[in-house]
Amino acid sequence: MQQRPIQFYYRGDIVRVQQQPPTRTVLQYLREDLHACGTKEGCAEGDCGACTVAVGELRHGELVWHAVNACLMLLPALDGKALLTVEDLAALAPDGLHPVQQALIEQHGSQCGFCTPGFVMSLFALASQHPGAGRAEVIDALSGNLCRCTGYRPIVDAGVAACAAPPCLPNPEPIVAALQAMATAPALDYRAGGARLRSPRTLAELAELYAAVPEARLLAGGTDLGLWVTKQLHELPELIALAHVDELKTIEHDPEWLRIGAAVTLTDAFAALLAEYPELAELARRFASPPIRNAATLAGNIANGSPIGDSMPALIALGARLRLHRLGAERELALEQFYLGYQHNALAPGEFVRAVLVPRRLPSNAAGPAPFIRAYKASKRYEQDIATVFLALAITRDDSGVVQDARLALGGMAAVPARAPQAEAALIGRPWNAVAVEAAMNELQQDFSPLSDLRGRADHRQRLARRLLWRAWLDSQGMTPLQLDELEPIARPAPEETL
Amino acid sequence: MSTPPPPVHDHVGLPYAHDSAPLHVTGRARYTDDLPELPGTLHAALGCAEVAHGRLIALELDTVRQLPGVRAVLTAADLCHGTSCGPILPDDPILCAGEIQFFGQPLFAVAADNVETARRAVRLAWAEYETQPAHLDIASAQAAADYVLPPVDMQRGDAAAALQQAPHRLQGQLSVGGQEHFYLEGQVSYAVPRDDGGLQLYCSTQHPSEMQQLVAEALGLPAHAVTVECRRIGGGFGGKETQSAQWACLAALLAQRTGRPVKLRLDRDVDITVTGKRHDFAYDYDVGFDDSGRLHGLELTLAARCGHSADLSGPVNDRALFHVDNAYYLDAVALHNLRLRTHTVSNTAFRGFGGPQGMFAIESVLDDIARELRLDPLAVRRANFYGAAPRDTTHYGMTVADNVLPELVDQLERDSHYPERRHAIAAFNAASPVLKRGLALTPVKFGIAFTATHYNQAGALVHVYLDGSVLVSHGGIEMGQGLHIKVQQVVAEELGLPLERVRIGATDTAKVPNTSASAASSSADLNGQAARQAAGAISTRLAALFAVLYGCHAATVEFKGGQVFSGEHRLDFTELVTLAYRRRLPLWEAGFYRTPKIHYDADTRQGRPFYYFAYGAAVSEVAVDTLSGATRLMAVDILHDVGRSLNPAIDRGQIEGGFVQGMGWLTSEELYWQPDGRLATHAPSTYKIPTAYDVPEHFTVTLFDNANVEEGLHHSKAVGEPPLMLALSVFFAIRDALAYCAAPGQRVPLAAPATPQAVLDALDAIGYRPGA
């Protein structure tokens, strides 16, 4: 790999960066280096959205704009892409205000105004991808943006109004041309400020590089690594980016497995997973926020090994496996075997996750009733919160209703996401009924010894685990309503007609 | 109440957008951290204690000083002048001198060439502590009888006798949590040394005058040498009333020491760790009542976590005591208020300023009474409303002169279909074992004025330039509440000018001195009046000139649409201004306003601390998942009294925003201290304010047709704080849903915030097992 600057499209030009260290965030670069201060820092951890910017890239030849958190995005992650910030939008409309901006003014959607640039960019990205988006889509698109002044109502109204307006996008031609031109650049090898980032293009290059420098940190979406930079001030002298490794960017559907490459974003991974398992819709909806899901990867969430990674229980329940790679040698293991302890996993030095393998759903003509699959999240807040307890389960029964296989996986109950062996044993071989489920609920107490922390007391976690399993039982019996989002407000009498 | 139609205005009462809205949405609005930095600017960071209570034995800072790029290190030993930034008592050290009072207390500050170096440097320090036992919650401070301020009693009548004679009697305990402000723009100060030894500060603050004073004391300078300027802040909510001064003092001290501009911008985690919050309260009550739920006697202890210092805990607790009545006549009442010292950050102002905690208590008591009597809580609330004399005076002796709540609540009950929905919810709940719905209508009566009478003053400076444009400076801070547009409307109205001819300048201690904080919902009332008065003095002077020019009577001269006229005589405003200038008449005026009629005797605890009351009520409909403890607000209807609105769009924004902020306080926002005293919820990843999903599609806000009985500002009423307490309806709707899980007559022991854990705790206490 040859050394070269980071390059990206910004305000009509291809910008080349060669001085900033590779751990410089896009937000630091904008605010401190360019003095482009429209983009704000509210938390520097990807939770408030004040720093939201739009990043453009080519998808099947089309220019697509995604919202991302500039506070967590390292500058090298912009390489080969286009950057659009709040200051740039006004220029897109003849009257000096983008429809999103116009709608926010008309709906009184800003008060203190500090969060507003982030909302503008999230709504811009939504309007660019989903013209005509309705209230639910607007709320989903804003789940990563916090406002402390307005109470959101006017912002949501503005979002709906802006999405109903004719699309207002940057002229794609020069941007597409720039993106295509940058795509011909050699793989990035970037050195500045005593740190180095390399961005290999092939699996073989990656494997060779990582085996040679096993102390390097792998950079995928960077939404966790960004925190090492912004919050922990870690020195990261060697970084290897996964984003441009072709073999890691694919989702493959073979007859038995869905193979999700390690560089596939959560947005794309969830789309593929939901096509197979619509039962996971709520998990996907409530996982972080669009800006995070647009950057972060499923494999990163797994390899990071946080005890509360909310994707893992569902994947474990489904029987997901990991394909690991080290210098051309590959091995597979069950996801639950990957975790050895708190932030400690089974990877050898120089080894990395190549892909997440999720079993395909069995065809509907397979023997026995369809497996009962559910994923339940319990958290303090519905959106963009980490589960206090997460329960996912897959129950396979025979025709007589006897449980043949039970996979119960929980998050928030131990140092790592884990199965519940005793509770599973209490179910297997017994009819799926209230008695067996209650027995399994009691066994959960034996399976886990959770901690008390800010997300809940230990006894509350035990209680939640039991009750979420009870929910599964009621759910399997078709009880409705069982989920708050199934409910509509109480209907009101129609207004009396005036005489 | 049928009130006369509002007078027709050109500007006042119109729904103008926030004056900075076009700047907000385009990213052009500058906040303190966005100001262009002067060459040589240094960046500061804090080094903080890592024990909750103890003595600092050793602090090794050589490694900090030696890090390349570090230009200055400041400890308590370097403070040669003022050492405290306490607003009322001098008990808030700018830097800890050795006795550590909370986990995260600043021990030293560093100035370095850039932010990263400063933040890296502070981590290189090494400290040794002698740890002492810490009181981290109300219970431990109460057991130790450790107070930042002496306990206060407030009473009327003979509560003990009333309790004994009452037909029914209940005792109970309650609690409500604190709240982090989570202003989106964190604390930031930029201090620039001047050539004369003075200092210019750009700051995110609600109280520039107090900051100026404290910085001057810290630097050993007269106040005239320190100027504080602020164009806008990215949210305050009380968190930048007193608690922005410490960071300004540190930036100023570092600037003085280095002779270079110094910016101190707190990282979010540091910000939440080192700044005070809303006080959490615990309550014990003993209440006597009759069959209708009407109160006969109440004895209530309010124990407040004040943190390590007094800060504003005195007035916050006072306001809690003033609002224990909320909308209700308390006949015989004895209140005991404990202002507890804990080894946690010093709690401070937060929208509502104790009022929410006072109201929470009485609303809980009435709800408990309703459960006990098996009555709809709304009926019990109504039975206790203020009414005709003698049921029209508060427990502190103020007459409730314009109690519109009975008719406001009637209107809301009717328009929101409360009775029909009550029946529908009962039917739903009977058939739904897991999901339960609840409904609650709660009122708000909130006193408007600073309870410290002397704060109720404001100044403004109005300049008319020769082109007929007008610059207004006043003492209020624009923090998103729409203060500037309201003042702009008032001045444009007064001078009969198009809105764009009037501009509101940055708030600046060099323009208007000795201002009060932008707080107590009073900024528009006070600063608007001062600006109106100044503009009025100018228009009076111009009218007199016009009268001389045309030989008409000055009283007949009108200002409208940029014109001045009387009968057939007409002159462009700008021409009249030019004529006045040539006649050497002053074209600028200072305005001053003091709120009339208010007085309060702190010894007898009697008086009229408030100019008037703002009223409102909300109906919230919720659903509760009894398996997970999750709750969801399904619909809310608000009817709120802002008098004659100065700007209905801005007022609606305040009502909606205040309501949602209050909902967060009572539902998802939970502060969690670890056993070592560290605040674990120090970032939005762990501290959960509401998101867009939490706000229901059915969210109606109606302005109650009313005019302020006091003259006020165009008969408007304050709107900043009162709506926050409308969110009590959410909490009591959750309680209501849980009551459907309880046996008749059983109380619902739900703690606030109603997190899923609190909800399941309450259900466990009730003994409800869903879907069994």
Image (spheres, coloured by chain):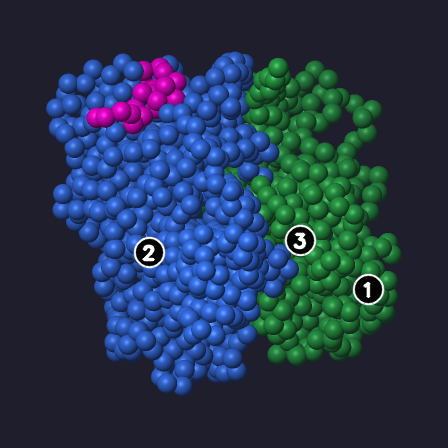
Q: Position of residue A215 (x, y in %)?
A: 62, 68
- Residue A360 falls in image quadrant: top right
- Assess disc 1: are there few (<14), some (14-19) or many (≥20) residues with their C-alpha within 10 Å of its C-alpha: many
Given the image, what chain letter belongs to the residue carrying mark 1? A
- Assess disc 3: are there few (<14), some (14-19) or many (≥20) residues with their C-alpha within 10 Å of its C-alpha: many
Residue under circle 1? A175
The residue sitting at 34% across, 67% down in the picture is B513
Rounded to the nearest whole Å, what is the CA distance between mark 1 and mark 3? 22 Å
Q: Which residues are magenta?
A: B370-390
- Is residue A231 within the magenta segment? no
Secondary structure of residue under mark 2: strand
Chain letter tied to blue: B
Labels 3 and 2 share a subunit: no
Residue placed most toward the observer, A261 or B391 = B391
Labels 1 and 2 share a subunit: no
Colour of chain A as rendered: green
Specify whether A119 is left or right of A17.
left
Rounded to the nearest whole Å, what is the CA distance between mark 1 and mark 2? 57 Å
- Assess disc 2: are there few (<14), some (14-19) or many (≥20) residues with their C-alpha within 10 Å of its C-alpha: many
The residue sitting at 29% across, 15% down in the picture is B292
Q: Position of residue B147 (x, y in %)?
A: 20, 50
User: The C terminus of chain A is located in which quarter?
Assistant: top right
User: The N terminus of chain A is located in which quarter?
Assistant: bottom right
